[in-house]
């Protein structure tokens, strides 16, 4: 885009900027299949545009973020349990 300003003119130019890297988050609960018992200490990994990880808390809750928007694989692992990939 170019702007031409003639002598004696006053030109108003309004510009809207789109933010880069608007952040997002992913959250949920890790529970034992069939019993819904919370699993504390499960490793939650988000792999893709960037890599992020977090452990689940005493109630099985985890939150990974802020993260860059994009496509990710979610991997959840815990000793003594089958690893899940989404």
Image (cartoon, grey):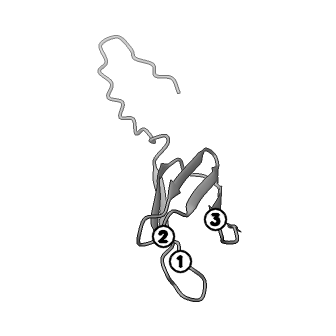
Mark 3 lies on residue: 79
Q: Residues within 10 Å of mark 2 (few under 14, many from 20)?
A: few
Decide which of 75, 35 is in the foreground and name it.
35
* Quarter of the figure with the C terminus: bottom right
Q: Secondary structure at mark 2?
A: strand
Mark 2 lies on residue: 28
Q: Secondary structure at mark 3?
A: loop
Tell me which label, 1 or 3, sits earlier in the chain: 1
Vertical position of residue 46 compared to residue 49: above or below: below
Q: Residues within 10 Å of mark 1 (few under 14, many from 20)?
A: some
Which of label 1 and label 3 is nearer to you? Answer: 3
Vertical position of residue 50 compared to residue 74: above or below: above
**CB under 8 Å between callouts 2 and 3?**
no
Q: Position of residue 6 (x, y in %)?
A: 39, 14
Instruction: Identify which residue is drawn at 53% across, 27% down.
Output: 1
Instruction: Identify which residue is drawn at 48% across, 76% down.
Output: 38
Q: Secondary structure at mark 1?
A: loop
View extreme (front): residue: 80
Mark 1 lies on residue: 31
View extreme (top): residue: 7
Real-space Cα separation, disc 2 to disc 1, in angstroms:
10 Å
Q: Position of residue 51 (x, y in %)?
A: 60, 46
Tell me which label, 2 or 3, sits earlier in the chain: 2
Vertical position of residue 34 compared to residue 84: above or below: below
Q: How many marks?
A: 3
Q: Position of residue 55 (x, y in %)?
A: 50, 58
């Amino acid at each position: 885009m170019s702007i031409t300003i003639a002598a004696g003119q006053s030109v108003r130019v309004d510009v809207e900027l789109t933010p880069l890297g608007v952040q997002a988050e992913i959250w949920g609960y890790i529970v034992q299949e069939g019993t819904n018992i919370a699993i504390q200490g499960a490793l939650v990994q988000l792999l893709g545009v960037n890599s992020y990880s977090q452990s689940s808390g005493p109630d099985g809750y985890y939150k990974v973020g802020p993260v860059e928007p994009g496509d990710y694989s979610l991997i959840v692992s815990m000793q003594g349990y089958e690893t899940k990939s989404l």
